Image (cartoon, helix red, strand yellow):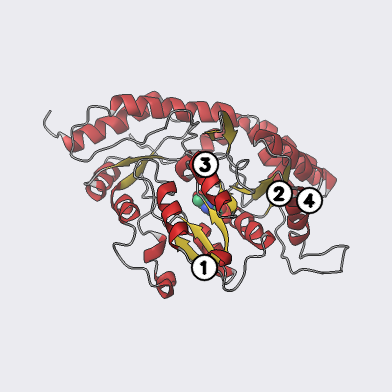
Amino acid sequence: MKIPLLDLKTQYAQIKDEIKQAINEVLESQRFILGPKVLELEKEIAAYSQCKYALGVSSGTDALLLALMALDTGHGDLVITTPFTFFATAGCIARLGAKPVFVDIDPVTFNIDPQKLESLLESMTNEELSRVKAVIPVHLFGHMADMQSIVPVCRRFGLKIIEDAAQAIGSECPFNGAVRRAGSVGDIGCFSFFPSKNLGGFGDGGMVVTNDADLCEKMKILRVHGSNPKYYHRIIGGNFRLDEIQAAVLLVKLKYLDRWTESRQKNAGMYNQMLADVSAESFRTPAALPGYRHIYNQYSIRTAKRDELKAYLKENGVATEIYYPLPMHLQECFSYLRYKQGDFPVAEEAALTALALPIYPEMSREGLEYVVYCINEFFNPNS
Ligand SMILES: *Cc1c(COP(=O)(O)O)cnc(C)c1O
Protein backbone atom coordinates (compact mmCIF):
# COMPACT_ATOMS: atom_id res chain seq x y z
CA MET A 1 0.00 0.00 0.00
CA LYS A 2 1.21 3.53 -0.79
CA ILE A 3 0.57 6.11 1.91
CA PRO A 4 1.71 9.67 1.17
CA LEU A 5 2.41 12.22 3.91
CA LEU A 6 -0.34 14.46 2.55
CA ASP A 7 -2.97 13.98 -0.17
CA LEU A 8 -3.99 17.36 -1.53
CA LYS A 9 -5.40 15.91 -4.76
CA THR A 10 -8.11 14.01 -2.89
CA GLN A 11 -8.92 17.11 -0.87
CA TYR A 12 -9.16 19.21 -4.03
CA ALA A 13 -11.43 16.67 -5.71
CA GLN A 14 -13.99 17.19 -2.93
CA ILE A 15 -14.21 20.97 -3.34
CA LYS A 16 -13.23 21.45 -6.96
CA ASP A 17 -16.44 23.10 -8.16
CA GLU A 18 -16.56 25.62 -5.34
CA ILE A 19 -12.92 26.51 -5.76
CA LYS A 20 -13.20 26.95 -9.50
CA GLN A 21 -16.18 29.21 -9.08
CA ALA A 22 -14.39 31.31 -6.45
CA ILE A 23 -11.31 31.70 -8.64
CA ASN A 24 -13.49 32.51 -11.60
CA GLU A 25 -15.10 35.37 -9.68
CA VAL A 26 -11.65 36.86 -9.20
CA LEU A 27 -10.81 36.39 -12.86
CA GLU A 28 -14.01 38.14 -13.90
CA SER A 29 -13.39 41.00 -11.45
CA GLN A 30 -9.76 41.42 -12.59
CA ARG A 31 -8.92 42.63 -9.07
CA PHE A 32 -5.87 40.74 -7.97
CA ILE A 33 -4.32 42.55 -5.02
CA LEU A 34 -5.95 43.38 -1.65
CA GLY A 35 -9.48 43.26 -3.05
CA PRO A 36 -12.82 42.26 -1.51
CA LYS A 37 -11.88 38.59 -1.07
CA VAL A 38 -8.82 39.52 1.00
CA LEU A 39 -10.98 41.80 3.15
CA GLU A 40 -13.55 39.06 3.64
CA LEU A 41 -10.88 36.50 4.51
CA GLU A 42 -9.33 38.93 7.01
CA LYS A 43 -12.70 39.32 8.71
CA GLU A 44 -13.27 35.58 8.85
CA ILE A 45 -9.79 34.70 10.11
CA ALA A 46 -10.01 37.43 12.76
CA ALA A 47 -13.30 35.95 14.01
CA TYR A 48 -12.00 32.37 13.75
CA SER A 49 -8.92 33.32 15.79
CA GLN A 50 -10.80 35.39 18.37
CA CYS A 51 -8.93 38.55 17.36
CA LYS A 52 -10.14 42.03 16.49
CA TYR A 53 -7.90 42.57 13.48
CA ALA A 54 -6.33 40.48 10.73
CA LEU A 55 -4.21 41.40 7.72
CA GLY A 56 -3.56 39.12 4.77
CA VAL A 57 0.12 38.86 3.92
CA SER A 58 2.33 37.14 1.37
CA SER A 59 3.49 34.19 3.51
CA GLY A 60 3.93 32.93 7.05
CA THR A 61 7.52 34.08 6.84
CA ASP A 62 6.44 37.59 5.88
CA ALA A 63 3.88 37.55 8.68
CA LEU A 64 6.73 37.02 11.16
CA LEU A 65 8.91 39.60 9.45
CA LEU A 66 6.10 42.16 9.45
CA ALA A 67 5.30 41.49 13.11
CA LEU A 68 8.95 42.01 14.08
CA MET A 69 9.15 45.16 11.95
CA ALA A 70 6.01 46.52 13.62
CA LEU A 71 7.83 46.21 16.95
CA ASP A 72 10.80 48.13 15.45
CA THR A 73 13.15 45.16 15.68
CA GLY A 74 16.59 45.97 14.34
CA HIS A 75 20.35 45.90 14.83
CA GLY A 76 21.47 45.14 18.35
CA ASP A 77 18.09 43.86 19.49
CA LEU A 78 17.51 40.41 20.95
CA VAL A 79 14.53 38.18 20.18
CA ILE A 80 13.95 35.02 22.20
CA THR A 81 12.57 31.87 20.59
CA THR A 82 12.84 28.09 20.39
CA PRO A 83 15.66 26.28 18.56
CA PHE A 84 13.22 23.52 17.50
CA THR A 85 11.19 25.14 14.74
CA PHE A 86 11.05 25.77 11.02
CA PHE A 87 13.87 28.04 9.90
CA ALA A 88 11.66 31.07 9.22
CA THR A 89 11.13 31.80 12.92
CA ALA A 90 14.82 32.39 13.55
CA GLY A 91 15.62 33.58 10.03
CA CYS A 92 13.30 36.59 10.27
CA ILE A 93 14.96 37.74 13.48
CA ALA A 94 18.41 37.57 11.93
CA ARG A 95 17.33 39.18 8.64
CA LEU A 96 16.39 42.31 10.58
CA GLY A 97 19.85 42.44 12.16
CA ALA A 98 18.60 41.30 15.55
CA LYS A 99 20.07 38.37 17.41
CA PRO A 100 18.07 35.17 17.96
CA VAL A 101 18.39 33.94 21.54
CA PHE A 102 17.27 30.36 22.03
CA VAL A 103 15.56 28.64 24.95
CA ASP A 104 15.27 24.85 25.12
CA ILE A 105 11.96 23.04 24.67
CA ASP A 106 9.60 20.97 26.75
CA PRO A 107 10.16 17.26 25.99
CA VAL A 108 6.43 16.43 25.78
CA THR A 109 5.05 19.21 23.56
CA PHE A 110 8.25 20.19 21.68
CA ASN A 111 7.40 23.82 22.56
CA ILE A 112 9.49 26.45 24.34
CA ASP A 113 9.93 25.63 28.04
CA PRO A 114 8.44 28.42 30.19
CA GLN A 115 10.67 27.65 33.20
CA LYS A 116 13.78 27.88 31.07
CA LEU A 117 12.49 31.10 29.54
CA GLU A 118 12.02 32.56 33.00
CA SER A 119 15.49 31.43 34.13
CA LEU A 120 17.07 33.02 31.06
CA LEU A 121 15.29 36.33 31.63
CA GLU A 122 16.25 36.31 35.31
CA SER A 123 19.89 35.72 34.39
CA MET A 124 20.03 38.67 31.99
CA THR A 125 21.53 42.03 32.94
CA ASN A 126 19.32 45.11 32.75
CA GLU A 127 21.28 46.21 29.70
CA GLU A 128 20.52 42.90 27.95
CA LEU A 129 16.88 42.98 29.01
CA SER A 130 16.47 46.45 27.56
CA ARG A 131 17.49 45.05 24.18
CA VAL A 132 14.97 42.18 24.14
CA LYS A 133 12.30 43.17 21.62
CA ALA A 134 10.06 40.15 21.78
CA VAL A 135 9.57 36.51 22.59
CA ILE A 136 8.34 34.21 19.82
CA PRO A 137 6.71 31.03 21.11
CA VAL A 138 6.03 28.57 18.28
CA HIS A 139 2.93 26.37 18.48
CA LEU A 140 4.71 23.43 16.93
CA PHE A 141 2.87 20.66 15.06
CA GLY A 142 -0.50 22.23 16.00
CA HIS A 143 -0.20 22.07 19.79
CA MET A 144 -0.01 25.46 21.45
CA ALA A 145 2.86 26.43 23.70
CA ASP A 146 2.11 26.82 27.41
CA MET A 147 0.85 30.39 27.09
CA GLN A 148 -0.66 30.31 30.58
CA SER A 149 2.91 30.24 31.92
CA ILE A 150 4.67 32.18 29.15
CA VAL A 151 2.51 35.31 29.11
CA PRO A 152 2.92 36.29 32.80
CA VAL A 153 6.70 35.78 32.55
CA CYS A 154 6.91 38.01 29.46
CA ARG A 155 4.66 40.66 31.01
CA ARG A 156 6.76 40.71 34.20
CA PHE A 157 9.75 41.67 32.06
CA GLY A 158 7.72 44.01 29.84
CA LEU A 159 8.24 41.93 26.70
CA LYS A 160 6.04 41.69 23.62
CA ILE A 161 4.90 38.29 22.38
CA ILE A 162 4.66 37.21 18.74
CA GLU A 163 2.96 33.84 18.34
CA ASP A 164 4.32 31.75 15.49
CA ALA A 165 1.04 29.99 14.78
CA ALA A 166 2.03 28.93 11.26
CA GLN A 167 1.16 25.31 12.11
CA ALA A 168 -1.62 26.05 14.55
CA ILE A 169 -4.63 27.85 13.11
CA GLY A 170 -7.64 27.01 15.31
CA SER A 171 -5.64 25.34 18.07
CA GLU A 172 -6.50 26.31 21.64
CA CYS A 173 -4.92 26.48 25.08
CA PRO A 174 -6.25 27.01 28.59
CA PHE A 175 -5.75 30.61 29.66
CA ASN A 176 -6.90 32.33 32.88
CA GLY A 177 -9.81 29.97 33.35
CA ALA A 178 -10.93 30.26 29.73
CA VAL A 179 -9.82 28.77 26.43
CA ARG A 180 -7.97 30.89 23.91
CA ARG A 181 -7.18 30.40 20.25
CA ALA A 182 -3.75 30.50 18.67
CA GLY A 183 -2.84 34.02 17.64
CA SER A 184 -5.09 35.76 20.16
CA VAL A 185 -2.96 35.38 23.28
CA GLY A 186 0.18 37.35 22.45
CA ASP A 187 0.48 40.79 20.89
CA ILE A 188 0.61 39.55 17.29
CA GLY A 189 -0.19 36.11 15.86
CA CYS A 190 1.26 34.82 12.59
CA PHE A 191 -0.35 32.24 10.30
CA SER A 192 0.91 30.51 7.18
CA PHE A 193 -1.25 29.35 4.29
CA PHE A 194 1.56 27.37 2.66
CA PRO A 195 -0.15 24.51 0.79
CA SER A 196 0.86 21.84 3.32
CA LYS A 197 -0.46 23.71 6.35
CA ASN A 198 -3.88 22.79 7.77
CA LEU A 199 -5.39 25.73 5.91
CA GLY A 200 -3.34 25.82 2.73
CA GLY A 201 -3.69 28.00 -0.34
CA PHE A 202 -2.69 27.36 -3.94
CA GLY A 203 0.64 29.08 -3.43
CA ASP A 204 2.15 31.24 -0.73
CA GLY A 205 0.09 33.23 1.73
CA GLY A 206 -0.17 34.21 5.38
CA MET A 207 -1.95 36.40 7.91
CA VAL A 208 -1.14 38.51 10.95
CA VAL A 209 -3.75 38.89 13.69
CA THR A 210 -3.82 41.23 16.68
CA ASN A 211 -6.12 42.89 19.19
CA ASP A 212 -4.00 46.05 19.17
CA ALA A 213 -5.38 48.76 16.86
CA ASP A 214 -2.06 50.65 16.69
CA LEU A 215 -0.05 47.57 15.78
CA CYS A 216 -2.62 46.69 13.15
CA GLU A 217 -2.42 50.16 11.62
CA LYS A 218 1.37 50.03 11.58
CA MET A 219 1.44 46.60 9.94
CA LYS A 220 -1.10 47.74 7.37
CA ILE A 221 1.24 50.56 6.35
CA LEU A 222 4.35 48.37 6.45
CA ARG A 223 2.58 45.85 4.18
CA VAL A 224 2.57 48.42 1.36
CA HIS A 225 6.17 49.69 1.61
CA GLY A 226 5.38 51.95 4.56
CA SER A 227 3.32 54.09 2.24
CA ASN A 228 0.85 56.46 3.98
CA PRO A 229 -0.63 58.33 2.25
CA LYS A 230 0.24 56.74 -1.06
CA TYR A 231 3.76 57.66 -2.25
CA TYR A 232 4.68 59.26 1.09
CA HIS A 233 6.85 57.12 3.36
CA ARG A 234 7.56 57.86 7.00
CA ILE A 235 8.74 54.29 7.59
CA ILE A 236 10.32 51.64 5.37
CA GLY A 237 8.12 48.63 4.70
CA GLY A 238 7.92 46.08 1.93
CA ASN A 239 5.53 44.27 -0.37
CA PHE A 240 3.86 41.88 2.04
CA ARG A 241 0.47 41.65 0.32
CA LEU A 242 -1.81 38.65 -0.04
CA ASP A 243 -3.31 38.22 -3.46
CA GLU A 244 -6.96 37.90 -4.25
CA ILE A 245 -6.86 34.45 -5.86
CA GLN A 246 -5.29 32.97 -2.72
CA ALA A 247 -7.94 34.65 -0.58
CA ALA A 248 -10.70 33.22 -2.80
CA VAL A 249 -9.31 29.69 -2.40
CA LEU A 250 -8.79 30.10 1.34
CA LEU A 251 -12.34 31.40 1.88
CA VAL A 252 -13.69 28.17 0.41
CA LYS A 253 -11.29 25.99 2.37
CA LEU A 254 -11.90 27.77 5.67
CA LYS A 255 -15.46 26.44 5.67
CA TYR A 256 -14.07 22.91 5.80
CA LEU A 257 -11.25 23.53 8.25
CA ASP A 258 -13.04 22.32 11.39
CA ARG A 259 -14.20 19.16 9.66
CA TRP A 260 -10.65 18.47 8.48
CA THR A 261 -9.34 19.15 11.97
CA GLU A 262 -11.81 16.65 13.42
CA SER A 263 -10.60 14.04 10.95
CA ARG A 264 -7.00 14.70 11.94
CA GLN A 265 -7.95 14.39 15.61
CA LYS A 266 -9.80 11.15 14.90
CA ASN A 267 -6.73 9.78 13.12
CA ALA A 268 -4.55 10.84 16.05
CA GLY A 269 -6.91 9.04 18.43
CA MET A 270 -6.68 5.86 16.37
CA TYR A 271 -2.89 6.07 16.22
CA ASN A 272 -2.70 6.67 19.99
CA GLN A 273 -4.84 3.65 20.66
CA MET A 274 -3.25 1.32 18.13
CA LEU A 275 0.31 2.32 18.95
CA ALA A 276 -0.23 2.13 22.71
CA ASP A 277 1.34 -1.31 23.03
CA VAL A 278 4.34 -0.88 20.79
CA SER A 279 6.97 -2.21 23.13
CA ALA A 280 10.09 -0.46 22.02
CA GLU A 281 12.51 1.42 24.17
CA SER A 282 11.86 5.17 24.22
CA PHE A 283 8.93 4.91 21.82
CA ARG A 284 6.38 7.65 22.42
CA THR A 285 3.25 8.95 20.74
CA PRO A 286 2.60 12.71 20.84
CA ALA A 287 0.58 14.12 23.72
CA ALA A 288 -2.30 16.59 23.70
CA LEU A 289 -2.28 18.20 27.14
CA PRO A 290 -5.60 18.54 29.01
CA GLY A 291 -7.59 21.61 28.00
CA TYR A 292 -5.69 22.05 24.73
CA ARG A 293 -7.13 21.67 21.24
CA HIS A 294 -4.41 19.96 19.22
CA ILE A 295 -4.99 20.40 15.49
CA TYR A 296 -2.31 17.89 14.46
CA ASN A 297 -0.58 19.70 11.66
CA GLN A 298 1.83 16.85 12.34
CA TYR A 299 1.62 13.65 14.35
CA SER A 300 5.20 13.22 15.53
CA ILE A 301 6.20 10.06 17.33
CA ARG A 302 9.53 9.63 19.10
CA THR A 303 11.88 6.68 18.85
CA ALA A 304 15.58 6.07 19.30
CA LYS A 305 15.43 3.97 16.08
CA ARG A 306 14.00 6.88 14.11
CA ASP A 307 16.20 6.70 11.01
CA GLU A 308 15.83 2.92 10.73
CA LEU A 309 12.05 3.16 11.15
CA LYS A 310 11.83 5.89 8.53
CA ALA A 311 13.79 3.78 6.04
CA TYR A 312 11.67 0.70 6.79
CA LEU A 313 8.41 2.61 6.31
CA LYS A 314 9.71 4.06 3.06
CA GLU A 315 10.53 0.56 1.77
CA ASN A 316 6.95 -0.37 2.54
CA GLY A 317 5.40 2.61 0.77
CA VAL A 318 4.74 4.83 3.79
CA ALA A 319 5.98 8.41 3.54
CA THR A 320 7.16 10.13 6.71
CA GLU A 321 9.14 13.27 7.42
CA ILE A 322 11.66 14.47 9.95
CA TYR A 323 10.65 17.76 11.53
CA TYR A 324 13.33 18.94 12.18
CA PRO A 325 16.68 17.20 11.71
CA LEU A 326 18.90 20.08 12.87
CA PRO A 327 17.94 22.61 15.57
CA MET A 328 18.44 26.29 14.83
CA HIS A 329 21.38 26.80 17.19
CA LEU A 330 23.42 24.24 15.22
CA GLN A 331 22.64 25.65 11.75
CA GLU A 332 25.73 26.71 9.87
CA CYS A 333 24.34 30.16 9.09
CA PHE A 334 23.98 30.82 12.83
CA SER A 335 27.50 29.74 13.78
CA TYR A 336 28.27 33.42 14.52
CA LEU A 337 25.91 33.13 17.49
CA ARG A 338 28.47 30.76 19.05
CA TYR A 339 26.11 28.13 20.30
CA LYS A 340 27.42 24.58 20.49
CA GLN A 341 26.23 21.00 20.60
CA GLY A 342 24.83 20.30 24.05
CA ASP A 343 23.45 23.80 24.66
CA PHE A 344 19.84 22.67 24.18
CA PRO A 345 19.78 18.94 24.90
CA VAL A 346 15.99 18.51 24.71
CA ALA A 347 15.80 20.09 21.26
CA GLU A 348 18.83 18.09 20.13
CA GLU A 349 17.22 14.87 21.29
CA ALA A 350 13.96 15.73 19.53
CA ALA A 351 15.92 16.33 16.32
CA LEU A 352 17.32 12.80 16.58
CA THR A 353 14.12 10.99 17.54
CA ALA A 354 11.02 12.75 16.12
CA LEU A 355 9.23 11.32 13.09
CA ALA A 356 6.00 12.66 11.57
CA LEU A 357 3.54 10.02 10.36
CA PRO A 358 0.84 10.65 7.74
CA ILE A 359 -2.26 12.10 9.46
CA TYR A 360 -4.03 14.02 6.69
CA PRO A 361 -7.83 14.24 6.94
CA GLU A 362 -8.54 12.17 3.81
CA MET A 363 -6.51 9.21 5.05
CA SER A 364 -8.51 5.98 5.13
CA ARG A 365 -8.82 3.76 8.18
CA GLU A 366 -7.16 0.96 6.19
CA GLY A 367 -4.28 3.26 5.37
CA LEU A 368 -3.81 4.14 8.99
CA GLU A 369 -4.01 0.50 10.06
CA TYR A 370 -1.38 -0.32 7.46
CA VAL A 371 1.00 2.31 8.87
CA VAL A 372 0.49 0.87 12.36
CA TYR A 373 1.00 -2.66 11.02
CA CYS A 374 4.32 -1.63 9.44
CA ILE A 375 5.47 0.03 12.68
CA ASN A 376 4.64 -3.12 14.65
CA GLU A 377 6.42 -5.27 12.08
CA PHE A 378 9.48 -3.09 12.39
CA PHE A 379 9.69 -3.32 16.17
CA ASN A 380 8.50 -6.95 16.53
CA PRO A 381 9.35 -8.70 13.24
CA ASN A 382 8.28 -12.21 14.17
CA SER A 383 5.23 -11.63 16.31
C1 LIG B 1 5.50 27.11 7.64
C2 LIG B 1 6.11 27.81 8.80
C3 LIG B 1 6.56 29.14 8.71
C4 LIG B 1 6.66 29.89 7.42
O1 LIG B 1 5.51 29.96 6.67
P1 LIG B 1 5.63 30.16 5.07
O2 LIG B 1 4.21 30.45 4.69
O3 LIG B 1 6.13 28.88 4.51
O4 LIG B 1 6.52 31.29 4.81
C5 LIG B 1 7.01 29.75 9.86
N1 LIG B 1 7.07 29.11 11.03
C6 LIG B 1 6.67 27.83 11.15
C7 LIG B 1 6.73 27.17 12.49
C8 LIG B 1 6.20 27.14 10.03
O5 LIG B 1 5.83 25.86 10.15
Secondary structure under badge 2?
strand
Q: Is residue 240 above or below residue 45?
A: below
Q: Earlier in the sequence, mark 2 or mark 3?
A: 2
Q: Which mark is residue 34?
A: 4
Name which residue type carries label 1: Glu
Separation of residues labelled 1 and 4 (CA atoms): 40 Å
Q: Position of residue 47 (x, y in %)?
A: 70, 34
**Secondary structure beneath label 3:** helix
The residue positioned 40% from the left and 52% from the top of the image is 116
- Labels 1 and 3: the sequence-earlier one: 1
**Quadrant of res 16:** top right
For the residues bearing labels 2 and 4, Cβ distance under 8 angstroms: yes
Distance in Å between CA atoms under marks 1 and 3: 23 Å
Asked if 313 appears above or below 79 in the picture, the reply is: above
Query: Residue 147's mark?
Result: 3
Residue 254 vertical placement versus 26 (above, below): above
Relative to the observer, which residue lies in front, 146 or 128? 128
Q: Residue at x 69, y 46 (%)?
A: 210
Quadrant where the image shows the C terminus = top left
Compare marks 1 and 2 and give the one earlier in the sequence.
2
Task: Please give the residue where the numbered disc 2 appears in the rendered image.
Answer: 56
Give coordinates of residue 157: x percent, y percent: 55, 55
Q: For residue 128, which numbered disc appears in the image?
A: 1
Type of amino acid under label 3? Met
Work out whether residue 149 or residue 7 is closer to the camera in this orientation and state it: 149
Q: Amino acid at mark 2?
A: Gly
